[in-house]
Image (cartoon, helix red, strand yellow):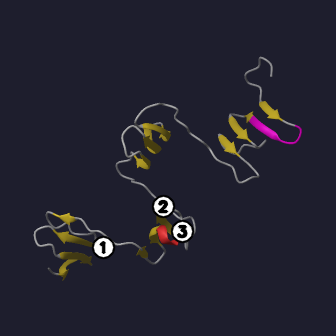
Amino acid sequence: MGDDLAADIVITNATATKLDITTGRIGVGTNNPLQRLHISSDSNDNQIILESLMDHPNASAQLELQNLGGLFGQLKGYSNTASPPATSRLELQSFSSSSGIFIQSASSDGDIRFYIGLRNDTDEHIRIATQSISIKKPLSLVAQPSAPPDPDIGSAVLWVDLDTGNLRFKSNVGGSVLEATPVEF
């Protein structure tokens, strides 16, 4: 490879480029990296593994998203094997105080689905479609010590009144807030 650190680095075998570092871009499996890191494969095993080998109760592997202003998001996986029962979780965090987290389907008719367990029809819990939200398992509402704030215009809230146990509903139609008790106990 020589002593010239500015030179391109290309590693190939007899049939394909395996690693290409040119113009500040790294290509793995491609000789034409389109972004800073471009991984390409013609098989179904194209994945990135971040592995923590720490022997620690809360070992994690994480992908941080940063800009000049600092950290603005994380994808983090935790595994706690120290205390029974062993637990694992995946977190998607936004560190922006104003933007939150966006989950978006690129297609105008694409559904967003939430599963617990295997990814099949019996384990689908919530589906957000273009015209509806389907909740496919029992819905639990948390009791509120007081009525939630008035919803935005065109929105509604549903809650359980902590004092009475009644199911309460509040909607805002054109700035006029309407409140009702659809289920009374």
Is disc 3 surrounded by few (<14), some (14 to 19) or many (20+) residues within 10 Å? Answer: few
Numbered tag placed on residue 46 in the rendering? none
Q: Is label 1 in a helix, a strand or a loop? A: loop
Numbered tag placed on residue 155 in the rendering? 1
Residue reaching furthest to the top: 3
Which mark is nearer the camera, 2 or 1?
A: 2
Residue at the image point whose x is 57% and y is 68% from the top: 107
Q: Is label 2 in a helix, a strand or a loop? A: loop
Q: How many marks?
A: 3
Please provide percent x and percent y for residue 26: 69, 37
As displayed, is residue 20 above or below residue 46?
above
As displayed, is residue 1 above or below residue 76?
above
Residue holding disc 2: 117
Which image quadrant: the N terminus?
Answer: top right
**Relative horizontal placement of residue 102, taking residue 152 as reference (left or right):** right
**Relative horizontal placement of residue 74, taking residue 152 as reference (left or right):** right
Which image quadrant: the C terminus?
Answer: bottom left
From the viewer's side, name the closer residue of 180 and 185: 185
Is disc 1 surrounded by few (<14), some (14 to 19) or many (20+) residues within 10 Å? Answer: few
* Residue 100 image-quadrant placement: bottom left
Instruction: Give the Cα separation between the discs numbered 3 and 1.
Output: 32 Å
Residue range (magenta): 14-20
Residue at the image point whose x is 72% and y is 43% from the top: 33
Residue holding disc 3: 120
